[in-house]
Image (cartoon, grey):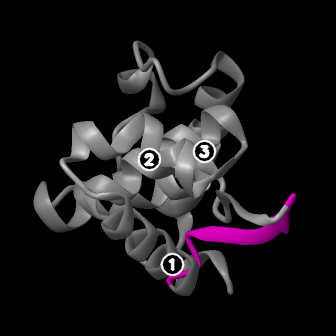
Amino acid sequence: MSADAVSQPTRPELEILKLLWRRKSLSAREIADDLAEPLGWSYSTLRTVLERMVDKGLLKRRPADGVNAYSAAVGKVALLGRMIQDFSDRVLELDAAPSAVFFAQSKLLTKEELEELEQVLRAEETKP
C-alpha cells in the first residue's frame, strides 16, 4: 500500500502507533498491557482495533513464537508529516505547513527526525 493510500489514524490508533514506534514489535497482549487501561478497552476490543489497523495499512502482523507480533507499517516522520500538512491545510487553511522547528520540544521526535520532518513538510509545499 502506498504511503498516500494509508488512512489517517484515529487518536487511539495513533497511541498504538506511538507505542510501536518506540518498542518496534509487540504482541497484542503486550500492547494491551500498556494501553488497554488508559484507552478504557477490553483485550478483545484492542484485538479488533489491531486487525482493523492491519487492514488499513497502518500495522503489519507476523507470526512469532505462536502469537501475532504487530509493528508499525508506516514511518513516524512520513505519517506525522501528512497529518501536519492535512491539519494545516484543512483546519488552519494555511498555504504551507509550519516549520518543523515548531515541534522541537516533541518527546516523540529525535533531532534527526525533526530534520527529516522539515524536509517532508517543505517537499509537500512544492507539490501542485
Looking at the rendered structure, the number of numbered marks drawn on it comes to 3
Q: Where is residue 118 in the image (x, y as percent from the top left)?
A: 56, 37
Give the residues in magenta. 56-65
> What residue is pinned by disc 1?
51
Which residue is outermost to the right?
65
Residue 67 covered by magenta stretch:
no
> What residue is pinned by disc 3?
20
Name the chief secondary structure element in magenta: strand
Residue 62 covered by magenta stretch:
yes
Where 52 falls versus 105 (above or below)? below
Of badges 2 and 1, the one in the foreground is 2
On the picture, is 82 further left or further right than 40?
Answer: right
Q: Disc 2 to disc 3, how far (Cα)?
A: 12 Å
Q: Disc 2 to disc 1, how far (Cα)?
A: 14 Å
On the picture, is 123 further left or further right than 96?
Answer: right
Quarter of the N terminus within the rendering: bottom right
**Circle 1 residues within 10 Å: few <14, some 14–19, many ≥20:** some
**Circle 2 residues within 10 Å: few <14, some 14–19, many ≥20:** many
Q: What residue type is labelled 2?
A: Ala
Q: Position of residue 31 (x, y in %)?
A: 51, 46
| Mark found first going from the N terminus, 2 or 1 | 2
Secondary structure at numbered mark 1: helix
